[in-house]
Image (tube, coloured by chain):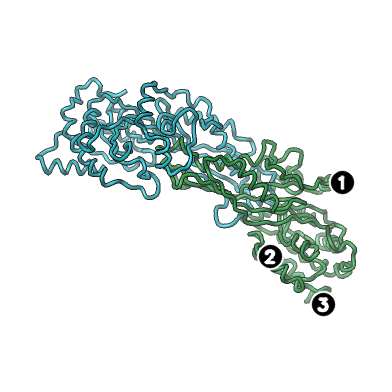
Chain colours: A cyan, B green
Amino acid sequence: MFAHVKAIECLLRTNTRLPVNVKCMFEGEEEIGSPHLQSFVTANRTLLHADVAVMSDMPIAGPGQPAITYALRGSLGLELEVSGPRRDLHSGLFGGAVHNPPQALCEIITSLHDRQGRIAIKNVYDNVVPLTSDERSYLSRVSPSDSSFLRDAQAERAWGERGYSVSERTTIRPALTINGISGGYQGVGGKGIIPARAAAKLSFRLVPNQDPYQVERLFRDHIARVTPNTVRAEVRAISWAKPALMEVRHPAIRAAAEAYKAGFGSSPVYLRCGGTIPVVNMFLESMRLPTVLMGFALPNDQMHGPNERFSLVNFYNGIRTSASFLKMVGFSSVVNSPDAASR
Amino acid sequence: MFAHVKAIECLLRTNTRLPVNVKCMFEGEEEIGSPHLQSFVTANRTLLHADVAVMSDMPIAGPGQPAITYALRGSLGLELEVSGPRRDLHSGLFGGAVHNPPQALCEIITSLHDRQGRIAIKNVYDNVVPLTSDERSYLSRVSPSDSSFLRDAQAERAWGERGYSVSERTTIRPALTINGISGGYQGVGGKGIIPARAAAKLSFRLVPNQDPYQVERLFRDHIARVTPNTVRAEVRAISWAKPALMEVRHPAIRAAAEAYKAGFGSSPVYLRCGGTIPVVNMFLESMRLPTVLMGFALPNDQMHGPNERFSLVNFYNGIRTSASFLKMVGFSSVVNSPDAASR
């Protein structure tokens, strides 16, 4: 974001006007699933009208290796609450004869994956579009290796769906993650209770052509099927974002590739990203507006984690890339390109 | 406790001295597993020397039906922590390829019980002493019914080990309860992270002759066996208390039965209680000192829960019972009884 602002400032200082018209849209709700964005986009099509959108909220392949992202995973945010007795019970007097809600929650969560690391919810993979072997082999050449992935994750071992590399598991395959879990006593020492309730935050990452609303229904069906009658389970869906897929031969993306050469000194690779940016699919579906996903961050910038950071080298390269892009995209005949509307 | 203090006060107001010598011991750490009690008891045998101990920290059978408790479950308090990546990770960029610690914790917790409600830890039932059919049938006559148990628990359905009534599951059989669970994001809405760690508080209730230190070893062995190499699990034991079993024909217990008749107007039944009071076994093992467990509380007094309460009727009946007991126990030849040392 700041790289683009800085690029505009540089261009305005060295030219009297920008090479193309620029509209800036700031969204402050992306991290909570953009709950008000769809209605804003629908209500402001004219204001937002553009030939191409640009966004830089994703990593590149590594230091010195820029990347253009052409696919994003969607997401579905959920809360799952399991309740049992109406109040916390004495675990001595009642322990062994009342189903413990944290235990029941654990049993339900365990049922969500099989032992091969696959999501064990019926029909959940039905709409996943398989990649061509050409695309899969291109991606395996340009994507981070398993070992560099694990180094960035500061994790010792990989886990997940058999038959896919770690990079594939995080980009071309759906994932279901427990983002948080809580229930009962959590302080120092112990407390002799059967907690009345326990809850978890879960989120799916979805790939083309999975639909978050359909996955929500499948999840609800699964929970209803596996919940024993000794507890009650409640599912609350809290956010929905569709996956997005861009046409890599779009002229604006070709302009971005040239801009990266100018800004980073090397051609970008084309990546799928495991993250989610709800607006990208909304622009596509509501306005047929494609987005160029020009990443500047490094894979180990600890996004969403403590000590999130951004390399200064990439910041300066990003400014140069953005300025070059603004100059080149005006010549790329975006407006009249037959590829302008993405799939 | 207050019933006994009040009984002593009444006796002193109507007599010049108490019928027996009374020593009061106050312990403030019972709810955290009495970590300093054993060393105190060992160091103060002379100070604590007595013919019989009295304690009233347990329920009776119901309103108007007093009870003497002759067995208590022991306990073992544990913490189980599962850690994965060194820090919270972005669930979009890493989700699907890193074992999620809350999920792994759930999978480990699920492995602790089988589908029949039994604890699925190898050898954990080995030392459980089976009851005679006489004792089992006596207890089934005097113990709360399944339906009254569920009413007291404010739970809709029973759960637990097949082949045992709910009352048996909470008194003569061991139980393993998750007292609390936590990890990752727990606030409003969602957060796209793979949490670096998740943890649970667990506690066993143990029956004669299970040993908490041996059960701790079995638990550690189980966790080591089921933990996948994609995460690390750490077990911390935080409290240990042995189960206790009293001789119901002990003269002091006979005196308590007579005292209940005077205080409540009816004879007590003899119950096993699912709760744990570490000092009872310590007095037995360290000093051969038996404890009369004279309960005054009702099963639905919400012990350890919110709005814990104590019925005034039982408070007054308790004062009368305690005063009668102090008068009668002096005549019960406790000191020279061959049953004085309990099993």
Q: Is residue B283 left or right of residue A272?
A: right
Please determine whether, in this image, residue B39 is positioned above or below residue A281: below
Mark 1, residue position: B134
Q: Amino acid at mark 2?
A: Leu
Residue B126, x across and y down, in percent: 76, 45
- The one of B32 and B225 positioned closer to us in this rendering: B225
Work out which quarter of the rendered image holds the C terminus of chain A and state it: top left
Is residue B317 visible from the viewing direction of this image? no
Circle 2 chain:
B
Circle 1 chain:
B
Near mark 2 (Cα within 10 A), the count class, few <14, some 14-19 or many ≥20, is: some
- Please tell me whether mark 1 sits on a helix, a strand or a loop: helix
Q: Marks 1 and 3, Cα distance to the nearest angstrom?
A: 43 Å
Q: Marks 1 and 2, Cα distance to the nearest angstrom?
A: 36 Å
Mark 2, residue position: B37
Q: Are marks 2 and 3 in contact (CB under 8 Å)?
A: no
- Please tell me whether mark 3 sits on a helix, a strand or a loop: loop
Q: Earlier in the sequence, mark 1 or mark 3?
A: 3
Q: Amino acid at mark 1?
A: Asp
Near mark 3 (Cα within 10 A), the count class, few <14, some 14-19 or many ≥20, is: few
Q: Are marks 1 and 2 in contact (CB under 8 Å)?
A: no
Residue A144, x across and y down, in percent: 37, 35
Rendered residue at 66%/55% (across/down): B303
* Residue found farthest to the left: A16
